[in-house]
Each structure stands twice: as structure tokens, then as C-alpha cells.
Image (spheres, rainbow, N blue to C red):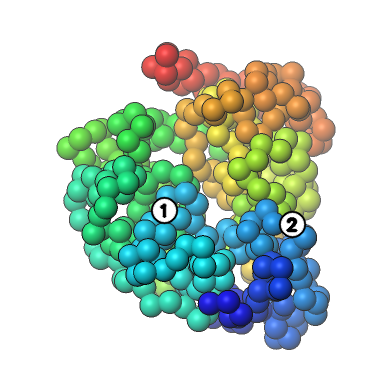
Amino acid sequence: MNGIKLDVLYGGKAVGTLSETANHRIAFAYTKEWLSSGFPISPFSLPLKPDVFVPSSNAFGGLFGVFADSLPDAWGQLLMNRMLRSHGMNMDEVGQLTRLSIIGSSGMGALCYLPEWERRKPQDLEDLDVLAEKCWRILSREESQDADELYALAGTIGGAGPKVMTEEWIIKFPASADDPEAGFLEKEYMDSARRCGIVVPETRLLPSKRCKGYFAVRRFDRTQGTDGMTRRHHVMTAAALLEQDWRVPNLDYHTLMKLTKILCRDRKEEVEQMYRRMCFNVFAHNRDDHSKNFSFLYNAEKDQWSLSPAYDLTFSNTYYGEHTTTVDGNGRDPGMKELMSVGKAAGISAGRCRSIAEQVQMEALPLQKKYRKNDG
């Protein structure tokens, strides 16, 4: 599909066009109509100007971050590649525009892409234990006739682990290397985060005969209107906003706090919300706190960005033993001193910083100790 162009849509309106340049970067230009009545879909990288924008880096395979957010991560990429190979496609010849065309209108967030590939429509969810088994077969590299079915259910979703998605929910399954009770653990962590004053989506444990339950989280990029219609919401990860490769640990919470202050127009509740999440990740030992695990939602009616509800909060290590996002430069063993430094630099009073951190510590530290003991 070299040389193709894709139209980008938001709420059924044409936003702009994507096309590939000679050096395989993906250029973007707004439509005249969007320039006159729309908003910058990526506030720092794509201002409302009648220009042709070309990414200056290859952090997202030649895409701007806002479009890369529409593409799946490891699990979804695996399913997409299996699906494409089953249709005789050469992975070396499948570019980013082809992948966005496959995503079409099925991705996370509000952006859609035309022309859209014809995709198999997802069937109703079957027994979750059966679905989990199919996911494990895919992960163990077994050939499976279920690749197309699983792609229809989960091929457009982010994250590294196996999961499926409905219009309202994301349901996670433990990978073969995970604790079989990973779902119960994540539910405990999300409930704890809520008690810490962190905004989290509704979560559930869905029944299983194999474990205490599969973790399910309600999608925040979709809401049901009073008219019964589903509303799609524009969402961007911090990685996309900053045009930074989330797989490279190059971020500090100072930057995330500054991003929140700028994007959310220095609203106190948003800045404190990011501070709470930093404290929770430290005290609850969530070290997989990379830049794609923080997102912002855009409210078109208010022309306003806000932090999305928190997600992917669980006990986690990294292979190098440090937080992916450093705290005042410290990734190995940050504590109250570093948390206070980041909070005060963001304009939160010392007393308020300490009060929030101590509240989160009291709630989250016992949870860390429980799972650190189990982790060995």
C-alpha cells in the first residue's frame, strides 16, 4: 500500500490527511474545514495551521505520536501480524499507513482512518477460560486458527499482556509467565488507588474456574450519552504528547508534572492528581510507570484537557530494577525526599505535598509489603 493516503476523521468530520514521504515519514495536513472549526489534535506537535507537518524523529515508526496511539502494542501487534501472515502478507512490506487502515474505526480514542479494511466483526464473548487458553496458545507461538477471532476482539488494543475488548470493557488475562492471580492483584491495586484519592475507572473481577477472576476495567475512551448513543473521546498518552518512545526510560516525574500543568492550564486538582499517582507508584512498587501509562482526555465542549482515569496500576518490577520514570532523578529507591521535591517544584505547598504523600503511603505501603513478600 505504498503511496496510499489516509483520511483522518473525528466524530464523522474530516480532520486531515496522512501520506508517506520519500524517507518513509508520515506527513499530515489539516483540512480547510477543520482549520476553521476544529482543535489541535496534538496540541504541541500539530497546531492549527495550514502546513504540511512531518515528524522530526522516528520514535513511532515515522508517525506523529497521536496517530501511533491508535496502533496496538505488543499483544495487539502480535495478533495483527498473525492475522496478516494468515492472509499471505509480508511483514516487511506492511507500513504504518496500512496498519492504521486496518485499525480504521476500531481503535482506542476518537480518531478513525479511511479507507478502512474490511475486518471480521467480533463475536459475543465466549467462556473466558476458553478465551484465556486461546491467548496462551498464541503467546506460546503455537499455530492457532483462532488468530483472526482474537484479533477481532483485541487486535487494536494497547498493552503488552493478552486481553480482549468490548465496547465498554477491557478484560485482561495473565500471560503464561504471570501469577495466575494477576487479575486479583490488579483489582486490589486499583481499589487501593481509589482509596488514595486517585481517579480510577470502574473495575470488576469476572468469574473463572481457573483463578479468582479475570480483571476487567471499564473503558474511559467511550461513554454512553443520555440518548443511548456511544460517545468516543479523544485521548493521548504522555508518550504521544511528548513525541517520546515509551520503551526508552528517559522521563522524570518533573516532566510529567510540567506537562500536566501546561496541558491542564495549571488546574490545581489535575496537578495534585498527577502527584498522587507518582506517590502511589513509589509506595505501592509499581515500577512499570512508563510514559504510555499516563493519558489525557480532551473535552471538545469545554476545549479542555484533563488527566484520564488511572490504569495499569499493579505490583511490578522492571528488568533493570528501577522505575521507568525517575523521581527527581532517582529511579532505584525514591522516597519522601524526592516526592516532596517534585511536588514543590510543581507549585504544591510543602505541607500539602507531605500530607498527600503520607496519606498514600499509609494506604499503599502495606499492599507493597504483601506482594513484595510473595515476589520473593
Q: Picture coordinates of residue 303 (x, y %)?
A: 70, 66
Considering every residue shown, the one lying at the far bottom of the view is 32
Query: Would residue 317 be seen by someone viewing this image from the given angle?
Result: yes
What is the count of numbered marks? 2
Circle 2 Cα neighbour tier, 10 Å, few/some/many (<14 / 14–19 / ≥20): some
Residue at left offset 65%, top offset 18%: 333
If you read the primary sequence from the N terminus, does the residue marked by circle 1 or circle 2 appear first? Answer: 2
**Picture quadrant of residue 291:** top right
Q: Secondary structure at mark 2?
A: loop
Which residue is identified by label 2? 57
- Give the residue type that dot 1 points to: Leu
134 versus 222 height, above or below? above
In the image: residue 88, left or right of residue 10: left
- Label 1's element? helix
> How far apart are labels 1 and 2 at the CA level?
24 Å
- Which residue type does callout 2 highlight? Ser
Using the rendered image of the protein, determine whether residue 7 is visible from the camera's viewpoint: no
Name the foreground residue: 367 vs 360.
Answer: 367
Q: Name the residue nearer the viewer: 37 or 122.
A: 122
Q: Decide: marks 1, 2 in contact (CB < 8 A)?
A: no
Could you tell me residue 12's position as x and y percent?
Answer: 54, 80
- Residue 138, x across and y down, in percent: 31, 49
Q: Is residue 328 left or right of residue 63?
A: right
Residue indicated by mark 1? 78
Above or below residue 279? Residue 265 is below
